[in-house]
Amino acid sequence: MRAARPLPPTGRLMLGASALTVLGALPPFLVGAQAVLITRDLGFGAAGVGLVVSVFFAAAALLTIAASGRFERMSSRTGRVLAGALVALGCLSVAVAVRDLVGLAVAMLVLGAANATCQGTSNRTVAALLPPHRRGLGFGIKQAAVPTAIMLGGLAVPTTTALLGWRSTFAITGTVGVLVMVTALLGGRRGARVPAPQTARRAPGPDDRAPWGPLVLCAVAVGAASMACNFVGAFLATWAHEVGLSVEQAGWLMAGGSATSVVVRVLTGARADGRFGGNLPVVAAMMLGGAAAVTGLGALPFPSAVVILGVVAFAAGWSWPGLMLYAVARLGRDAPTQATSVVQAGTFLGGALGPVLLGLVVGAAGFRWAWSVAGALFLLSAILILLARVGFGQDLLRRPPASVFHYGGGRSRPRRTTGGAAGGAGTATLRDGG
């Protein structure tokens, strides 16, 4: 009988980045999926759920903005040690010490810092260490970690939560954080810095700086979309319970919707590797699909409609992040980690503002108005993404990169090509993400 073949280095990098992202992203979705039980035990309502989820993403956003340069320089081992320690501290505190809303908010502050560390370490791995022809798939697999976290949160309700209570899910997550930290420490310096593949290197040009104008537009766009997405993650289970599903059925809905999002993220990432750009219009189309789905959630408050539209909201409205990060990593030129950090910060800020603001809308006007606001946010995001794409194209013409750069879409040949001769260095052929 043949021994199992070891996973190739590229596969290990992808799966490692994805697993670390799952660990960092999981806590707010544990709160969202178990919100009915947590609010009952700790004595707060929907606005409190929005607050603690927002605290998580606000902490992640602030640390991402402040430490993007450090994530660029930090070794993989250091990042994993720090991420594991923060996850362990935050989750084990929830499991054994939290007794009210304030305590939960403080723990989520620590866990938000853990998420930023997990994301920064993973983004650096994918953007800098994977071969260029595998980065679309790499970002797809990495960002599939977020719906995987939601799926795990949903599955926890009819399984671990039903048997051991909601605190047990945080105890398990905290224990995994300890294992990540210990494994990284015992690994010594092995694998601390993996050299970037030669195919990923290219000679820097004097104008190969990140195009900040379009990147800021992208950050605002993903911030608005993330407000809507994280409202779905934090409140869909509560809304499903309100329209007639049981707590367990709502958990299965979260798990099923998240599973579809995992599949779509990986498939869109793999397809992106097979074409020369043209990815931002796909991102905009997904956001438009999310707008239709969440608007329908408020307009059709029936169990069957909520199940169908909830799955669509995950499959379309929350499957764009991997493709988005792939695009900006390519268009970020010689600073892919900093470019993805700008967009990641927008994601975290949206995650911070969305649950609390839309939670207040729920408290003041009800879920139907909140779902309509979420739909408008998705629509705004799609428009901004398309405007950013125009800006990226103009920037490529105004500042041709040092290496040959294909963009505009196409599978057999690119629609547009720039760079190389103008930059005076390099002949590498790169497929861009825009």
Image: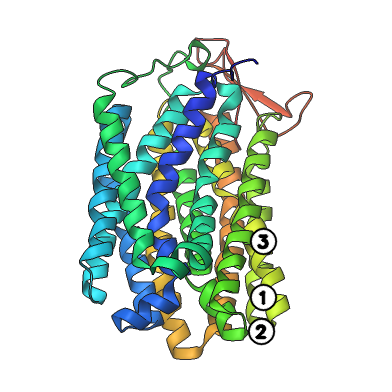
Residue 148 is situated, as x and y percent measured from the top left of the image, at 53, 51
Mark 3 and mark 2 lie on one chain; the one further toward the N terminus is 3
Mark 1 and mark 3 lie on one chain; the one further toward the N terminus is 3
The residue lying at 54 percent from left, 48 percent from top is: 321
- Circle 1 Cα neighbour tier, 10 Å, few/some/many (<14 / 14–19 / ≥20): many
Residue 61 is situated, as x and y percent measured from the top left of the image, at 33, 53
Q: Check residue 301 in the rendering and tell me which mark sits there, or answer none.
A: 2
Q: Residue furthest front?
A: 1
According to the image, label 3 marks what residue?
A: 288
Which quarter of the figure is the C terminus placed in? top right
Does the rendering let one see residue 332?
no
Residue 55 is situated, as x and y percent measured from the top left of the image, at 30, 65
Name the element at disc 3.
helix
Tell me the CA gap for discs 3 and 2. Answer: 21 Å
Q: Using the image, determine if residue 128 lies above or below residue 290.
A: above
Three-letter amino acid code of the residue under disc 1:
Val
Q: Check residue 306 in the rendering and tell me which mark sits there, or answer none.
A: 1
Q: Could you tell whether 232 is left or right of 356 in the image?
A: right
Three-letter amino acid code of the residue under disc 3:
Leu
Tell me the CA gap for discs 1 and 3. Answer: 18 Å
Tell me the CA gap for discs 2 and 1. Answer: 7 Å
Name the element at disc 1.
helix
Name the element at disc 2.
loop
Q: Using the image, determine if residue 386 lies above or below residue 350.
A: above
Determine the image quadrant of residue 98. Answer: bottom left
